């Protein structure tokens, strides 16, 4: 009998994805935990003005806003599952839904194409550093093909140090996007380029 370990490297090959919905809302809550992924964010950081986002950290403000998006059937993101458990999250919606990106001086639109943005990730602790981010990106590319989404855009980091703490990797690492086939399309920011995947 093979000894059980905490190594999940083989498991990422069995990853399945689903858009966040009413049906899997409780799985999303389990993944994000009591902290709402990090500091009661609930993946609302890019969707709100700073004052609104900060106010939403108190109580369940940001959590309720995310729930409202889902209950209104608006696109919010993609959950990655292994063995029925949500182990990864990727924010994924039309660029205009992310106010901070739309108002960014560094990541201004480079054209008028309809774009879907991927501004952040959250991966369950025991599944980190195992290539899961590349796998979920590839799965989202397939999802985009099936749903007539033509341009995917993201704003990952190119770390200036060899090992980046998990707390700073939530916007995604450039090397993950590169491995999934994304290309740099704008480099106003040296360490946070704009990347795209054209379907």
Image (spheres, rainbow, N blue to C red):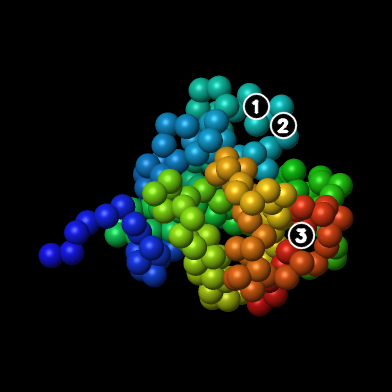
Callout 3 touching callout 2 (CB < 8 Å): no
Residue at the image point whose x is 73% and y is 70% from the top: 183
Locate the N terminus by quadrant.
Answer: bottom left
The span from disc 3 to disc 2 (Cα, nearest Å) is: 22 Å
- What residue does disc 2 label? 50
Residue at the image point whose x is 49% and y is 63% from the top: 131
- What residue does disc 3 label? 194
Residue that extends furthest to the front in the rendered view of this protein: 162
Residue 173 x/y as whole percent: 63, 56
Task: Compare marks 3 and 2 and give the one earlier in the sequence.
Answer: 2
Mark 3 vs mark 2: in front: 3
The span from disc 2 to disc 1 (Cα, nearest Å) is: 6 Å
**Dot label at residue 54:** 1
Query: Crowding near pointer 2: few (<14 within 10 Å), some, many (20+)?
Result: some
Residue 42 x/y as whole percent: 53, 38
Query: Crowding near pointer 3: few (<14 within 10 Å), some, many (20+)?
Result: many
């Amino acid at each position: 009998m093979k000894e059980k370990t905490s190594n999940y490297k083989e498991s990422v090959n069995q990853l399945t994805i689903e858009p966040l919905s009413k049906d899997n809302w409780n799985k999303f809550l389990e993944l994000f935990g009591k902290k709402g992924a990090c500091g009661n964010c609930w993946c609302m950081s890019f969707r709100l003005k700073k004052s609104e986002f900060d106010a939403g950290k108190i109580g369940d403000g940001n959590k309720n806003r995310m729930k409202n998006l889902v209950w209104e059937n608006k696109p919010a993101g993609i959950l990655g599952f292994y063995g029925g458990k949500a182990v990864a999250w990727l924010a994924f919606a039309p660029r205009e839904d992310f106010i901070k990106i739309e108002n960014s001086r560094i990541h201004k639109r480079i054209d008028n194409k309809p774009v879907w943005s991927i501004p952040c990730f959250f991966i369950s602790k025991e599944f980190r550093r195992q290539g899961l981010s590349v796998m979920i990106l590839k799965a989202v590319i397939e999802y985009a093909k099936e749903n007539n989404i033509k341009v995917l855009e993201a704003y990952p980091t190119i770390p200036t140090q060899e090992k980046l703490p998990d707390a700073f990797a939530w916007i995604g690492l450039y090397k993950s996007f590169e491995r999934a086939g994304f290309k740099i399309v704008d480099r106003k920011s040296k360490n946070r380029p704009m990347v795209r995947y054209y379907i």
